[in-house]
Amino acid sequence: MMIFKKSMPRRTFLRGAGAAIAVPFLDAMVPALAASSASSQLRVGFIYLPVGRIMENWTPTAVGSDYELTPTLEPLAGFREQMLVVSGLDVKAADLLPGERGGPHARPCAAYLTGAHPFPDRVGISFDQLAARHLGQDTPLASMELGIDPPEWAGQGAGDYSGFYTSTVSWRTPTTPLPIQNNPRTVFERLFGDTDTLDPETMRRRIERKGSVLDAVTARVNAMKTSVSPADRYKLDEYLDAVRDIERGIQAAESRTTSDHNASAREDISRPAGIPADYAEHGKLMFDMMYLAYQTDMTRVVAFMLGHEGTNRNFIELGAQDGHHSLSHHKGDAGAIELLKKVDRYQSELLAYFLGRMQATKELDGTSLLDNSIFVVGSGLSDANNHVHNDVPVALLGGAQGKLHGGRHVRFAGEPLSNLHLTVLDMAGVPADEYFENETADATGILPGITS
């Protein structure tokens, strides 16, 4: 690694007409990084799995390091040493209070990341937003909230609760839910469009002619390459190639959806468009957005829902004839259970795609993005057939900068899930005092045996 006497600022952008491309970590930034704590921050993510899991295919039989990967976890085999499967945690805050009824999907979803009881008019600040308040002070975006289902969809089982109770897990305040964004183009422009100088007509023309956001910064890229090391030039090319590849994927999806509706229609960038019909394609594009946001340090906190709680998405590509929620009420039907197992594994494969990208991308010190991240992956329900929110499926993934004691399956006895979220915040150095101001907060403390 080269040390430059004249350093490049860590927060460097390549700016052009309607574009602001954040530059990833380069050797040229080393002196600037040494003078700050930017390189030591942990990236945190919360990935929500909708409609529970078929638990026999999720939970390993044995505890400790000699457990056998279950069918749903098999796609994550390449990350076993940085994975901790955690059993025996309950979403206690979702329990019905006297006089309450309904909302069998809304309550567990709303309580999942808030650790607070959901009332029809309020819940609690979610753990991702507590992290965002602390970790987001030095990044352009405090947090990102992503998903695959349309934000206006309400999942099944909301009952008397607002649609937000099933369509987001992020709450900025007890009464302010944060809607998810499921449009790859919108997220891409949020990451790489210069919102301070953005001309909607210029953006529209670029999108219509299938141009690249990189076209506006070509001269600045070439100038930067003359002032950095060969290793940095390679890293910059690799990064910009990745940005362009992802942009092409978005353009391909836009071309298909535009032609499906009206081949000559003028594209309206003010509304969602270009969302792939294929679940895996859509999921990969959204995970690509999450990956680029972490790589460029645009944010260090992301919540991503692989579907709304109670989603009734139809996985036709897996042979399903009924929606996800309908299948989850299988009443013991073997065919429906087998289809649910396929959906569970399908989503694990998507997760593995994202983790692979994080693992393959190196930081200045030779560690990977995954080494410097921690992800909570889980659901607010275990057995969706009976709306059970005890012993929910959850795992931690990532190196957490050496703080996670991975490669194991650990089992607790009815501890609140929010204790795990508290433990993750503690790993990231995030204070949680504000969480305990909520009178319905169900956490009791940090879980033992999670960290190294």
Image (cartoon, rainbow, N blue to C red):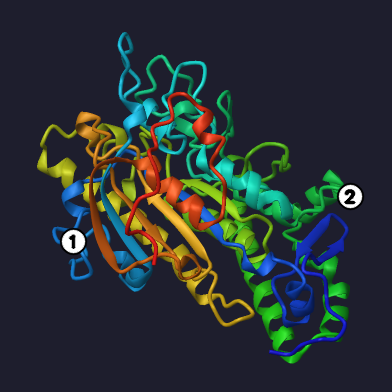
Mark 1: which secondary structure?
Answer: loop
Q: Residue at x 62, y 67 (%)?
A: 40
Please indicate, yes or no, whether residue 330 appears anywhere in the rendered image: yes
Quarter location, residue 62: bottom left
Rendered location of residue 190, percent (x, y): 71, 50
Q: Residue at x 52, y 49 (%)?
A: 276
Mark with earlier residue (2, 1): 1
Residue 180 image position (x, y, % from top left): 56, 39
Q: Is residue 188 left or right of residue 16?
A: left
Q: Which residue is mark 1?
A: 63
- Callout 2 environment at 10 Å: few (<14), some (14 to 19), or many (20+)? few
Q: Which mark is residue 359?
A: none
- Residue pointed to by mark 2: 197
Name which residue type carries label 2.
Thr
User: In this rendering, does residue 105 appear at all?
Assistant: no
Q: Nearer the viewer, residue 108 or 54?
A: 108
Q: Against 133, is 41 above or below?
A: below
Where is residue 388 drawn, in percent x and y? 23, 32
Against 329, residue 214 (above or below) is below
